[in-house]
Structures are given as C-alpha cells and as structure tokens.
Image: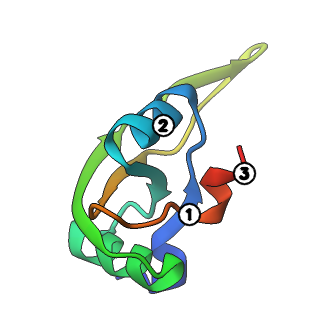
Amino acid sequence: MATTYTTIRRPLITEKGLGVKETEGTLVFEVAADATKTSVKQAVEVLFKVKVAAVRTANYAGKERRRGKFSGFRPDWKKAYVRLRAGEKMPEYVNSL
C-alpha cells in the first residue's frame, strides 16, 4: 500500500480539471495504481490540510505508442476526483493558475 507522499503522484491541470474545480469544488490528481479512495482522502487531508467530502476514482489503460518501427505501451494509470467540503479553501497550486 502506498504512503501519504506516494499516493498522490501529481495534480492534473487540464481544461476539464479546472472546469470541475470552478463548478464543483473538486481537485483532480494522478494517484498510485494501488491507491484506494480512503487512502486518497487521507493523503489529501494531510498534505493540503483540507476536509474532503468525497472521492471518485477512474482507471485508465495505457495506450500503444510508436516511434518509427518501434512500438511500446504507456503504463496504466489512475485518476482521482477529490471533492472538498463546502467552505474549504482550494490549495495554492490551483489558485495561482
């Protein structure tokens, strides 16, 4: 099982992610493949010092990629949508965009 600092890999800053942040108060992260909803919730609460209302996760299969005649696969990965409780302040990395 992943620890607090390895559960959350990086924030996903995309148009869809920023739209969800504005409308629903939800943060989007790439998380470890073995991370559970409970471990993601605990990691976000510890790292960003906020209260989490709900966590949704989605698994993505790696795609085949080619470089000329050579082909390979990108790794499988997992995304987590973390909804904060009403009244919680968004973390700084999101506010600065």
Q: Residue at x 34, y 70 (%)?
A: 40
Q: Residue at x 28, y 44 (%)?
A: 58
- Tag 2: amino acid: Gly
Image spot of residue 47 (x, y percent): 52, 81
- Could you say which is closer to the camera, residue 37 or residue 26? 26
Q: On the image, numbered disc 3 is attached to which residue?
A: 96
Q: Earlier in the sequence, mark 2 or mark 3?
A: 2
- Could you say which is closer to the camera, residue 42 or residue 9? 42
Q: Secondary structure at mark 3?
A: loop
Q: On the image, numbered disc 1 is attached to which residue?
A: 9
Q: Residue furthest front?
A: 87
Q: Residues within 10 Å of mark 1 (few under 14, many from 20)?
A: few
Q: Determine whether, in the image, residue 38 is placed left or right of residue 73.
A: left
- Could you say which is closer to the camera, residue 45 or residue 31? 45
Say if mark 2 contacts mark 3, CB within 8 Å. Answer: no
Q: On the image, numbered disc 2 is attached to which residue?
A: 17
